[in-house]
Amino acid sequence: MSTTMQTYIDEAEKALLHTYNRYQVVFDKGEGVYLYDIEGKKYLDFVSGIAVFALGYQKKEYNDALKAQIDKIIHTSNYYYNLPAIEAAKKLKEISGMDRVFFTNSGAEAVEGAIKTARKYAYLKDGTTDHEIIAMNHSFHGRTMGALSVTGNAHYREAFAPMIGHIQFADLNDFDSVASLVTDKTCAILFETVQGEGGIYPATKDFMRRVRALCDERDILMILDEIQCGMGRTGTMYAWQRFGVKPDVMTTAKALGCGVPVGAFLMTEKVGAHSLAAGDHGTTYGGNPLACAAVCKVIELFEKENVLDNVNKTGAYLENRLDELVREFACVKQRRGVGLLQGIVFDRPVGEIIKRAMDEGLVLINAGTDIIRFVPPLIIKEEHVDEMIDILRRCIREAEGERQ
């Protein structure tokens, strides 16, 4: 590492709150599926800003759309209408099949809105405020207090107790564990269609359908968190669409804006008419013209460039190549995932391998201590998968060699 790079890192450590153990690199620019640090070193990006930069870097049409909007207007507040928000809401309804949209600034904010929606929906039915939400163990929904309260990892929550109350935790894909927690006070069942941070666990079709039937029977809201697994990453615009099991409320973010901070929670017309009303919820920046211009262009480019077709084709290829590593290395125990949201499970912590990969020009992240997660831009090709596998295989071999 050069003196200049280290100087910048040292300055950052003096100024930024230390809530991240950052990798020792300062990125400067991107091009396609590659990143470049301030020294000009090139890195193949299989993180995409944690499943955000779905269209890759320096997409001219995307950049031009944002520049054009900046030259018009960036912010007006939600006391007024703006054309990009109207168009973005229309496009988002079309790709999701939902009916009502509330734009936020992040995924965590979208989860907060979904929680409030469920509690207001139940409150309007019986006038009480002791309703319960069932969430899942090993889930991750964000770091704000409400989102943290439904995150099924006690380690994330323990220092910040007490959380918001009346949250129960079941196990993903164990319907009986969900059903056993349902009471007359249950107002929502909330889970990620594919758990991301918790270990790359996809919900099964049977589980989805049984939860949907239970919610219909008891007038409970089914809330799906599609923040990481949505926007095409699993091969459909939203992961639940693979099964045709529609939620009552859905959250989305990350690739929705491809780098511009924007999220949303969406709901059916029924929920929209019987939950949040004027004065119940708000945001200063949410739905601003710049963010919504990004959403409009992202959805347009997904369709224009057949991104879903590429995810299904390249995702299948990635699965096959990762399965090779499972067969080749005893330390690689399993592959899990769907489309271009994949993970391989090791029999040990993966931090050293990820660090080696960074040194070799490959950007990877973990999902838990023993899982390497793969969330590349959705425009990657088979050649990029091959390049990644070659580097990763070499890093695993080197790490194995040092252990012997």
Image (cartoon, grey):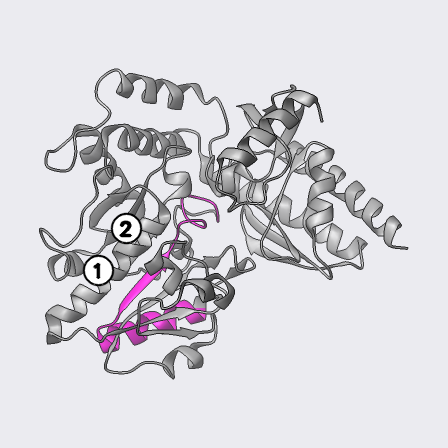
Q: Is residue 379 visible to the viewer in this orientation of the structure?
A: no
Tag 1: amino acid: Thr
According to the image, label 1 marks what residue?
A: 117
The image's mark for residue 265 is 2
Evaluate if marks 1 and 2 touch, with contact meaning CB atoms under 8 Å apart. yes
> Who comes first in sequence, dot 1 or dot 2?
1
Give the extent of the magenta segment: 206-234
How far apart marks 1 and 2 lie (CA) works out to 10 Å
Residue 287 image position (x, y, % from top left): 23, 37
Residue located at (80% from left, 53% from top): 328
Q: Quadrant of the N terminus?
A: top right
Label 2: few (<14), some or many (≥20) within 10 Å?
many
3 up-or-down from 359: above or below? above
Residue located at (58% from left, 54% from top): 367
Q: How many marks?
A: 2
Secondary element at image label 2? strand
Q: Quadrant of the C terminus?
A: bottom right
In the foreground, 2 or 322: 2
Tag 2: amino acid: Phe
In this picture, residue 34 sits left or right of residue 250: right
In this picture, residue 317 sits left or right of residue 378: right
Quarter location, residue 88: top left
Q: Is residue 225 visible to the viewer in this orientation of the structure?
A: yes
